[in-house]
């Protein structure tokens, strides 16, 4: 049965810093899936937001000489601005300092308490503020967290969640639901972590104040990860009424998979709530071969890329460069090469050549394919059919599996094939000798472009829209359903003056 609802989420980002391409990347992936689902007629909730409590944010506010609230207001706005700059289509933006979230986090806490899964004790152990995570002695490497972050010794009264009781249930769940954690290699890491044994989890702190008070004992504030994970429920109206939960997909970076694939499902099981259907972990961007960090001064801001290369070029490059789930590297030189060879010289050139030939030779209207003396269009028809040989189910599966690079490269391959077809058929040669044949060639090229533009919409919404406008495709005929031949271009439709879509990038000296 076709699914008619889809709930997709990004991590909520810490407001200790300005957004960079790593943050934009995870949200972009969600945006592309959300757009694809909407174009497939599915009702979507796409959520992103900011994680504003905890010691790390409190410290950053102090360093900036601001109150935590003023500081979080300011930095959270930068993430909101990023959504606009990147053309993200999120339906909601949650901040953990909002009342709706506090209510929700306290309700989940109470539920776990009622169900007997929370108890008061003392915590003593290592804590890393940068990671906002507890570490066991055995996990430390040369006195630091395995991530390289500094740790400090913490001893305080704390509430605990009985995580150790959920080890077997979690393992059974992973076993029964092989798609729950992706990619496969990450799934295996989670399984071996859980098999290694789970300790009860400290879920409250008393040594600072910037957090959500524990219901019934305000001396304690909730551990920031307990607070943060609940955002996926609070944005859907929990505990009053939820309309989208369970989430279909949580996309997160590989650094925070453990929180989502171990702690979160355990909390949900303990509260008798349904589990998200899938958690997909994306890999890590380095920049010119180096880890991206403020101290190395190599942080790439998405807005800088947008200003230099264009918005859709940036969206395209980030998802095209390497398979989602793997690690990859940002290189300025590679970005120029990709933008020029695949967007300017390939798709852009195809659109430009075809539409200007139509404008010049077919009275600026969609040409006709009727009455051609030979079967010229067979090959092209097949090319256009490339889009249709894949069933909607298969395409949907590719999106759900986050195979962005594969999807993009298939579209580019189709564009290359159409360009090669122009060269081999040379419609301008047919102009005098066989104008009908020329028209047929141009018709199928234009129809191929229509399909390409429809398919590019999730990745490059503005540019795809411009191409569809140039083809005078009706606004209500631009979904994946409209790839079907029944909605093919109608000969005789007047077309506007062609415009360049993807300019060539010329490096400024
Ligand atoms: O962890 N490459 O927030 P955060 C790829 N608040 N992705 C990257 C990246 C990089 N170099 N750097 C960051 C938190 N990311 C918590 C989450 S969720 C309930 C709470 C992305 O601001 C990636 O998705 O540290 C990573 O998981 C996320 O940003 C971490 O953002």
Image (cartoon, rainbow, N blue to C red):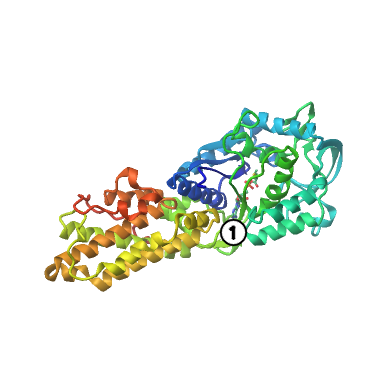
The image shows residue 426, relative to residue 62, as above or below, that is below
Quarter of the C terminus within the rendering: bottom left
Please tell me how crowded label 1 is: few (under 14), some (14-19), or many (20+) other residues with Cα within 10 Å.
many
- Expressed as whole percent of the image width and height from the top left, the position of residue 196 reads 81, 57
* Residue 286, horizontal then vertical, whole percent: 58, 60
Label 1 CB-ligand 1 distance < 8 A: no
Quadrant of res 272: top right
Judge by depth and name the residue closer to the eye, 146 or 184. Answer: 184
Spot the residue most to the bottom: 424
Which residue is pictured at 19% across the width and 56% down the height? 359
SS label for mark 1: loop
Q: Is residue 307 left or right of residue 266?
A: left
> Can residue 507 be seen by looking at this rendering?
no
**Residue furthest to the front:** 1
Which residue is denoted by mark 1 in the rendering?
325
Measuring from the top left, give residue 466's x and y in whole percent.
Answer: 32, 49
Give the residue furthest to the left: 432
State the image quarter where residue 216 is shown.
top right
The residue drawn where x is 47% and y is 58% is: 317
What residue is at 62 percent from the left and 41 percent from the top? 246
Q: Quadrant of residue 485?
A: bottom left
Total numbered circles: 1
**Image check: 454 left or right of 265?**
left
Q: Is residue 203 above or below residue 409?
A: above
**On screen, 263 above or below 419?**
above
207 relative position to 235: left or right: right
Residue 395, percent from left and from top: 47, 56
- Asked if residue 446 can be seen in this view, the reply is yes
Height in image: 447 above or below 425? above
């Amino acid at each position: 049965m076709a699914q008619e609802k889809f709930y997709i989420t990004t991590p909520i980002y810490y407001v200790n810093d300005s957004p960079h391409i790593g943050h934009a990347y995870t949200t972009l992936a969600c945006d592309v899936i959300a757009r694809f689902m909407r174009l497939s007629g599915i009702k979507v909730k796409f959520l992103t937001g900011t994680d504003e409590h905890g010691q790390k944010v409190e410290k950053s506010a102090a360093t900036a000489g601001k109150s935590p609230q003023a500081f979080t207001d300011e930095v959270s706005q930068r993430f909101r601005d990023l959504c606009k700059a990147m053309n993200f289509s999120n339906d909601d933006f949650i901040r953990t300092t909002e009342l709706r979230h506090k209510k929700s986090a306290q309700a989940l806490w109470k539920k776990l308490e009622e169900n007997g899964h929370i108890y008061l004790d003392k915590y003593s152990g290592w804590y890393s503020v940068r990671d906002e995570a507890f570490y066991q002695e055995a996990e430390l490497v040369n006195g630091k967290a395995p991530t390289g972050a500094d740790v400090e010794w913490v001893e305080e009264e704390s509430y605990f969640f009985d995580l150790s009781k959920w080890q077997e249930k979690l393992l059974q769940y992973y076993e029964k639901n092989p798609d729950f954690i992706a990619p496969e290699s990450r799934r295996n890491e989670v399984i071996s972590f859980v098999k290694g044994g789970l300790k009860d989890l400290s879920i409250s702190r008393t040594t600072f104040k910037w957090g959500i008070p524990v219901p019934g004992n305000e001396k304690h504030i909730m551990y920031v990860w307990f607070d943060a994970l609940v955002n996926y429920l609070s944005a859907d109206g929990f505990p009053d009424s939820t309309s989208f939960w369970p989430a279909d997909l949580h996309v997160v970076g590989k650094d925070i998979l453990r929180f989502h694939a171990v702690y979160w499902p355990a909390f949900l099981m303990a509260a008798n709530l349904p589990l998200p259907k899938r958690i997909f972990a994306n890999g890590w961007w380095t920049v010119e071969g180096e880890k991206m960090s403020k101290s190395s001064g190599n942080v790439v801001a998405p807005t800088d890329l947008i200003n230099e290369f264009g918005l859709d070029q940036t969206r395209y490059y980030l998802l095209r460069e390497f398979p989602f789930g793997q690690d990859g590297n940002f290189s300025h030189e590679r970005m120029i090469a990709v933008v020029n060879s695949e967007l300017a010289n390939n798709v852009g050139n195809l659109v430009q050549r075809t539409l200007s030939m139509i404008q010049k030779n077919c009275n600026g209207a969609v040409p006709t394919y009727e009455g051609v003396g030979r079967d010229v269009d067979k090959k092209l028809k097949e090319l256009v059919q490339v889009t249709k040989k894949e069933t909607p189910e298969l395409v949907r599966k590719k999106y759900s599996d986050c195979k962005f690079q594969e999807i993009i490269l298939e579209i580019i391959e189709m564009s290359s094939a159409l360009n090669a077809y122009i060269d081999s058929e040379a419609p301008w040669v047919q102009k005098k000798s066989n104008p009908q044949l020329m028209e047929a060639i141009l018709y199928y090229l234009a129809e191929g472009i229509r399909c390409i533009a429809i398919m590019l919409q999730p990745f490059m919404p503005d540019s795809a829209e411009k191409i569809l406008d140039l083809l005078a495709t009706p606004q209500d005929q631009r979904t994946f359903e409209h790839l079907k031949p029944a909605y093919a271009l109608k000969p005789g439709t007047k077309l506007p003056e062609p415009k360049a879509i993807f300019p060539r990038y010329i490096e400024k000296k």
